[in-house]
Amino acid sequence: MLRTSAPVRVLDGRDLDEVLALLDRDPVADVFVASRIELAGLSESRLGAQVWGYGERGSLEALCYSGANLVPVQAGPDAVRGFADRARRQGRRCSSIVGASDAVLPLWDVLRPHWGPARDLRDAQPLMALSGPPAVEPDPGVRRVRPDEIEVLLPACVAMFTEEIGVSPMAGDGGGLYRSRVRELIAHGRAYARIEDGRVLFKAEVGAATRRVCQVQGVWVDPALRGRGLSLGGTAAVVELSRREVAPVVSLYVNDFNHAARRAYARVGFTEVGLFTSVLF
């Protein structure tokens, strides 16, 4: 039986100010959770997730977002044990555990015997950020994707997701939820691409954003065109556009074994600011 020195509880609107202050400690690492809570608050019905807190009201030490993803935030060893105990008793409802490696790895160590083997463990994913202009020339052909171009963009998004995650986002419900998500990103002006003659050459999206930080995801180049430098100019363009239109700091995280991508992001001007881990089910 796991023992904790402070209670783990479901947070509500009364905890909002404390939660936002805690998330503000590391706005780059915690942009995903912060973006969701800034938009929807702590109501489970609006957020589509519970937020667990470690510590009494007035002395909140850590939190854990529990939805489609399980995301520990500012969680030290005691908080990790408390969150692991609650997650174990609840049973797995998430498709991934993701966040800072120093919290996710010990959390997974406790949960692994109860939740079974993961489909994939990506234990070292450098978190990178850029707070100034890109260091290479942006590709002028990269622009916001228009709402009427969803059918052009969607196959590239599916190809990227399948290549990166190892499963198709079109499985299960036939892709309805994934299509809605892509449509939502386009509608909010957070899908960028270079499109020529109805063909996506490069694309990326801003998947999470606060007023201070945005996180780029889904960077993809048509496989037939890889090795020609499209990712450099394309990523630089996304940085330039998102810094102007979304938030002044741009972040992303990348698999440690993807040496080509890491080199490209470094050339664009990104520096490593942390380390993430993802456990995929």
Image (tube, rainbow, N blue to C red):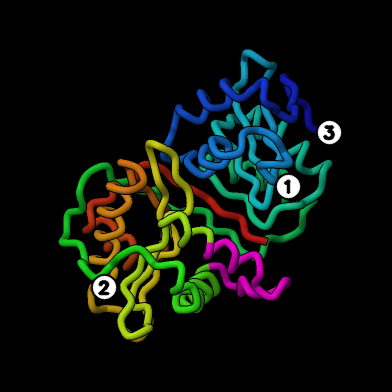
> Residue 1 got which mark?
3
Q: What distance separates the C-alpha of mark 3 from that of mark 2?
A: 53 Å
Is the residue 193 above or below the residue 60 in the image? below
Q: Which residue type does callout 1 highlight?
A: Leu
The residue shown at (66%, 69%) is: 176
The residue shown at (36%, 75%) is: 221
> Residue 230 got which mark?
2
Quadrant the N terminus occupies: top right
Label 1–label 2 contact, CB within 8 A = no
Is the residue 19 above or below the residue 114 in the image? above
Residue situated in front as seen by the camera: 261 or 66 = 66
| Tag count | 3
State the residue lying farthest toward the front.
Answer: 148
Please tell me whether mark 1 or mark 2 is closer to you in this view: 2
Q: Element at badge 1?
A: helix
In the image, taking residue 29 as reference, residue 193 lies left or right, namely: left
Residue situated in front as seen by the camera: 247 or 125 = 247
Q: Which residue is mark 1?
A: 111
Q: Which residue type does callout 2 highlight?
A: Leu
Q: Few, some or many C-alpha atoms within 10 Å of disc 1 (few <14, some 14-19, many ≥20)?
A: some
Q: Which residue type does callout 3 highlight?
A: Met
Q: Where residue 214 appears, x then y in whole percent?
A: 40, 46
Q: Where residue 232 appears, x then y in whole percent?
A: 24, 66
In the image, taking residue 234 as reference, residue 19 lies left or right, namely: right
